[in-house]
Amino acid sequence: MALPSDGAICFVNTSQGRRLDLFEYQGKQLFARHGIPVPRGEVADTPEAARAAAERIGGKVVVKAQVQIGGRGKAGGIQLADTPEEAEAHARKILGMDIRGHIVHTVWIEAASEIAKEYYASVTFDRGEKKPLVMLSAAGGMDIEEVARTRPEALATVHIDPLTGFQAHHARWLVYHAAIDQGAQQGVVKILQQLYQAFTELDTMLVEINPLIWTASGDVVALDAKVTIDNNALYRHPELLEMQQSVTEDPQERLAQEKGVTYVKLDGDVGILGNGAGLVMSTLDVVALAGGRPANFLDAGGGSKADEVVAALEVLLSDPKVKVLLVNIFGGITRCDEVATGLLTALDKLGATLPIVVRLDGTNEDEGRRIIAEQAPANVVVEATMLSAAKRAVELAQGVEA
Amino acid sequence: MALPSDGAICFVNTSQGRRLDLFEYQGKQLFARHGIPVPRGEVADTPEAARAAAERIGGKVVVKAQVQIGGRGKAGGIQLADTPEEAEAHARKILGMDIRGHIVHTVWIEAASEIAKEYYASVTFDRGEKKPLVMLSAAGGMDIEEVARTRPEALATVHIDPLTGFQAHHARWLVYHAAIDQGAQQGVVKILQQLYQAFTELDTMLVEINPLIWTASGDVVALDAKVTIDNNALYRHPELLEMQQSVTEDPQERLAQEKGVTYVKLDGDVGILGNGAGLVMSTLDVVALAGGRPANFLDAGGGSKADEVVAALEVLLSDPKVKVLLVNIFGGITRCDEVATGLLTALDKLGATLPIVVRLDGTNEDEGRRIIAEQAPANVVVEATMLSAAKRAVELAQGVEA
Amino acid sequence: MSILVDKNTKLVVQGITGREGAFHATRNKAYGTNVVAGVTPGKAGQDVEGIPVFNTVRDAVEETGANTAMVFVPPRFATDALYEAIESGVDLIICITEGIPAHDMMQVYTHLRRGNQTLIGPNCPGIISPGRASVGIMPTQVFNPGRVGLVSRSGTLTYQISKELAALGIGQSSVVGIGGDPVVGSSFIDIVTRFDADPETDLIVMVGEIGGNEEEKAAEFIAANVSTPVVSYIAGFQAPPGKQMGHAGAIITGSSGTAQGKKEALEAKGVRVGTNPTEVAELAQQALAAQ
Amino acid sequence: MSILVDKNTKLVVQGITGREGAFHATRNKAYGTNVVAGVTPGKAGQDVEGIPVFNTVRDAVEETGANTAMVFVPPRFATDALYEAIESGVDLIICITEGIPAHDMMQVYTHLRRGNQTLIGPNCPGIISPGRASVGIMPTQVFNPGRVGLVSRSGTLTYQISKELAALGIGQSSVVGIGGDPVVGSSFIDIVTRFDADPETDLIVMVGEIGGNEEEKAAEFIAANVSTPVVSYIAGFQAPPGKQMGHAGAIITGSSGTAQGKKEALEAKGVRVGTNPTEVAELAQQALAAQ
């Protein structure tokens, strides 16, 4: 399943390319390339492969479920193994596990670390300040949001000017103010510098290490890795593009990704196709107000041309839960005639017979409406306003249901 | 001989580490590392080596005198050779040549280029604006200062914000406004970007290509290379430090460089040791006003400690032309007692008997004067003011001369 | 009156020879906007429907006196185009381009906000001052001259709400799409401040959506500084709460970023919030009637 | 009165536990300067002659209200120290450190000049307002309270000329060493402007040297904007013309950069220029007598 980085924000981001969380193991691979120490480890997708990996790594290992959701430890998705046999047994249990709706397809086997202290370190894009924010805490290994709420003094934060960058004095300030243990300070400073470098060079929106551990032997090591990519920058990071492709699982979302359509699956039965994130969100709201349940968020994007509309409809119609389609277009850079042409082409190609409610306004609206009126099949209904279109779509969905 | 990048400015620069021009061949090696196309070539310091180099390069070659001064072409320091034998013969004539006071110790043998057009490109540090300045002209191969004076429209210039850097639009603007031939535009744009990158990454004060040629085969190639280093940044460029060391020839200047003393040789006989570039320059002026001729510029620098003074005196006393020494110190961060101790130590160690006129003022002046008064040998004379010290030194120099 | 674009606007269109650039530059000109120049590197001397094309923005500004630049350049080249516009010295830059990486925009933003130029967008539909000038991609037929200042993060929602206003006979002084990207050149607060200073704007309609905390910040600002009445709409009530952007995201904003949270923040400061575009237009009508 | 430093100065010394930092911080304090803090990473809680040491400048500013920072940090770490001082929010930063790479300083300068803070130096001796405060490395015994404002690119030459002035019974309102590096935070024009606005400065002495064109620019500025009389000294008449910095160097400045050229530029604008430090003091005496 595609995993927009946060629920609320993902919808907004759909208008400019989603953000995408990587798996822990992918993040660790990237960290290692940027010089951040991580435990030695390997990926496995079968119990046997897990055993072989544990043998190569040697000693005690940890078997970790690779899922895009927190709380995997509590769910039993992280297990310590003394032997390769034990690693295999753990992997057998963890692979296929359902952790809060996420199926585990991969485990990460890594050398077990002796933890002396657990810290927290991250670099985030702060949307409010429009600057990177670096955070450090000696209270790692737990929910950092909780730490921020209950013991704000335990979390040191500093904003970075994106033109002059992260400097030594920032690292020092963080380390002193997070009260990092003296023996670990040098290692933490170095990791903060590398983490910031990774943040900028990889065009990420978030790099987070929780816990960042200080080991019994005196090393500072990233024991977890959370990396969120800015999809708008993927064109200059082919290696991240590959990682992204391996993350998406839902068939509609995977198809949407292939077709270059911004799509998020929801629970309802009214399929929605609109242009512009704001209008699509508003359409969901209006459908809900009319008593219906949206099946998805689909933003055909700015300037949607005929073949993009075809691609969008292919994605929507591949979802068997969709009973009615609501096409809500207000053309600016998008031109209504092209949307109409795309709609007809798609219906022709896909032969869909479900009811389709269309509202077309804006650039070239007259041509668009004329094309629909003259050429559309009988299952296509035109409504004059967004509100009436939403109501009609909900009625039709309830009719189908009944 | 040490080659401060410009006569006037060099003296000022002595207060913060000199700038240093590299040889053409060194510049080309650096350019090549930054992806700027240069003709294939080799360094030679004997006629035989020149022949061997020409054989390896193959075809027609150019034999170029490596000196830190313009006008070597007119002086016969650049010769085309059809064969390795001819290259050897040219090298025999050029090596040892005196070009405006510069002895040729090295030649650069490079593949001859078929020149279609000659351009000019440079990135300079603009002291007035405190920003990099990129310059481009289609009128290359000649004195660019002359071009700027007589046909300013032929020289396109653009200042660069050092925080946001050189961008594609800067390159485009330069190429269009310098009226670069269309077929060469893409190659020039690429070289401008690499040249700016070299400028910043190498911490240089100037990178200049004149001529930048457009060859008959359609390539854009740097046919010359002028690179001026910021010595203050040498600590982060060990490879430049090595190049710098190979450039300095004058024995006093080489010794000064080894000892970390800022020194420039002049023509006179009054050796001058002062602290701070401004005071030393003023001392030269006052010596000249008193009718004397300074033998050098020597700035012992801020905070000169006893052993730095010893090093400075070693450099001065190694010059047989020096008849009298004028030590002019106004202590701020420099402490007069340490200067006095250094002076006595040096005299003791080097056993110098020439007259030495000393003026000490500023931080710890009483202790400094007391040390001289109590312990200095008879050839050390103390004067109360800078003006009287200069006059006394000039008188003594003339007495020695007479 | 109007804000940002009007009869004094002299527009240069960057990327004018591209499909979208040519289409919308021509439409903007047809609306009456003074489109004085276009820029496409290497195409100096050509023209697009009578609009002269230059190689660089600086050339266009020097030759035509352009004071406003519109960026219609693909995202990979748009950052460069933005810096070029900034260095050309134009007062106002409107960036339509969608898909510019956030890190690039953070740098552009930091650079720009230290000077006196204004950037609208990126990923925005532009600005229209009905009857005076249209710069961008908005479908002009839904806008009429009037006394409502409309500012929105969403392009298509802007059109929707303007159409609802038009149905009630309400027009606008200016309509500003500030763009939906995480880093945009001008915020709600910037634009609301301009509307508040405009004597011909009697009401401000602010159209927000989920994510970030710009609406919450605007609510505080409006309560403290703005005398013009404001009504608002927030899209995204049906967006599922879903996953947080790391734990880091929520800590920063100190706000949930949800539509409900934004609605409550605005209402707490006396700004009425509609639940759908039709209702927002009705609220606007009531607010205007009460004046 | 005086400029930049006075009895209101609250000084934090970066690099206070180093040899030079400790020596001069102590001397500055002994002179009467309000030295409230020092900074050396990892040495918080220590003190230097009663001056408390902090880990970071921000801590020092928050705890002591320091408004001025002096940088005494070796060149490899000085750029970082400058940015740290800038971010701490102090009004004035005085950088004594010599040997900072020019590229680093170009960036610091560009960053700094967009804000409202003032940087003096690097590679400068500091500032003294005789009888009020001394921040830096100047030998205090050659300065006396008075009505001459002295600004200089050279440290030791500043002391020399101050001593010559003292010999004639002339003291200073403030003495500012702006530093000899190619990129310094404040120019002659910046400091001359401050002196001109100071009612207790009756005469400005400007001490230049060869290289760059700051003196020439100052001459133009003085003629157009400054009512306080100015006398000047330029060092480096005996510097040989030597080689040019590429051909590029001279094109930029449009000036020879020679002492003779600077002298002529100043005299053309009515500024009298002495040929040696003693003569400059005499010119100052005459100018003061003429008032």
Image (spheres, coloured by chain):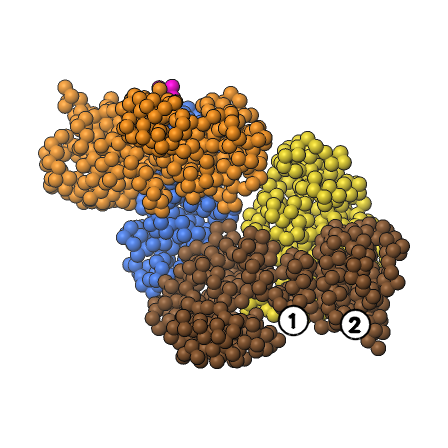
Chain colours: A orange, B brown, C blue, D yellow
Picture coordinates of residue A72, whole percent (x, y): 36, 23
Q: Residue at x 20, y 33 (%)?
A: A316
| Circle on res. B292 | 2
Q: Is residue B155 visible?
A: no
Q: Are marks 1 and 2 in contact (CB under 8 Å)?
A: no
Picture coordinates of residue A332, whole percent (x, y): 28, 43
| Circle on res. D241 | 1
Closer to the camera, D167 or C201? D167
Under tag 1, what secondary structure? loop
Q: Residue at x 73, y 51 (%)?
A: B303
Under tag 2, what secondary structure? loop
Horizontal placement of A58 versus D23: left or right?
A: left
Identity of the amino acid at label 2? Answer: Gly
Q: Residues in magenta?
A: A71-75
Say whether residue B214 is magenta: no
The chief SS type of the magenta part is: loop
Crowdedness near tag 2: few (<14), some (14–19) or many (≥20) residues, C-alpha within 10 Å = many
Report which quarter residue C250 is drawn in: top left
Picture coordinates of residue B37, whole percent (x, y): 41, 64
Crowdedness near tag 1: few (<14), some (14–19) or many (≥20) residues, C-alpha within 10 Å = some
Give the letter of the chain under mark 2: B
Q: Nearer the viewer, mark 1 or mark 2?
A: 2
Q: Residue at x 52, y 53 (%)?
A: B162
Closer to the camera, D2 or C224? D2
| Circle on res. C103 | none
Identity of the amino acid at label 1? Answer: Pro
